[in-house]
Image: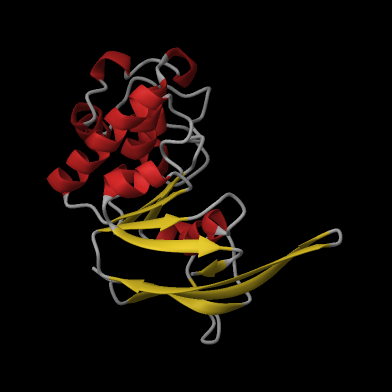
Amino acid sequence: MSVDVAIRTTLRADDRRFDLDVSFVSEHRRIVIYGPSGAGKSLTLRTMAGLLTPDAGHVRVDGRTLLDVAAGVNLPARDREVAYVFQDYALFPHLTVAQNIGFGLARGWLNPRRRAHDDRVRHWIETFELPVVADSYPVRISGGQRQRVALARALAGEPRLVLLDEPFAALDPALRGRMRAELMALQARLDLQLLVITHDPADVEALDGHTIEMRDGRVV
């Protein structure tokens, strides 16, 4: 599966200006974008996910055009088949683990019912070894479990590509190592296409993917 990104945009806030000009192509199953905070890594992911519209450029996944500014193509986030896992996981505190996982499976304004679990939700609860906490709220589970819930929610929609924004940054060092290993094992088992951003050289070494370095809004 190929990932083809070429985007340009300028962001302004008060008297500050940030120019993002990123271009890369990869067919690797695990892509790592590495660079310091403020390099534009998260902006790149948000553009790929459809949460930010650039001034120019395109995003293509497996030959499918998700964004082409010149051609007037800009698929909504829900139609891109790209899952975005936020750095803080962005779990809904008022929903249980099972409800969080099932949140994106049904369109509309209603939250998933607390006791009615879709078969797909049950599948991911089992896959991520979460049955014991399925009816618990995010505040009641560990950091590692919260990360698994966020991943399960992302994968429940069967995306072509999973984007992970600093997935290990909020974890303590011991848990960080274990979760890296879990992510690698999960990718191998499910044959996932992953794009991970990080500022940590240890993540780059552990993930051992196609590494793209960014600084000051550009690939270096």
Viewer can see residue 110: yes
Q: Is residue 19 left or right of residue 98?
A: right
Nearest the eye: 194 or 73: 194
What's the residue at 26%, 52% (across, down)?
208
Nearest the eye: 66 or 6: 6
- Against 164, residue 16 (above or below) is below
Horizontal and vertical percent position of residue 115: 34, 20
Figure quadrant of residue 183: top left
- Against 17, residue 97 (above or below) is above
What's the residue at 51%, 86% (across, down)?
71
Figure quadrant of residue 52: bottom right
Figure quadrant of residue 144: top left
Nearest the eye: 120 or 82: 82
- Against 98, residue 200 (above or below) is below
Query: Which of the image's four quarters has the N terminus?
Result: bottom left
Horizontal and vertical percent position of residue 28: 24, 64
In the picture as drawn, the residue positioned furthest to the bottom comes out as: 71
In the picture as drawn, the residue positioned furthest to the right comes out as: 15
Viewer can see residue 113: no
Q: How is the image coloured?
A: secondary structure
Horizontal and vertical percent position of residue 20: 61, 69
What's the residue at 17%, 52% (across, down)?
191
In the picture as drawn, the residue positioned furthest to the left comes out as: 189
Tell me how many marks there are.
Answer: 0
Horizontal and vertical percent position of residue 110: 49, 35
What's the residue at 42%, 57% (across, down)?
33
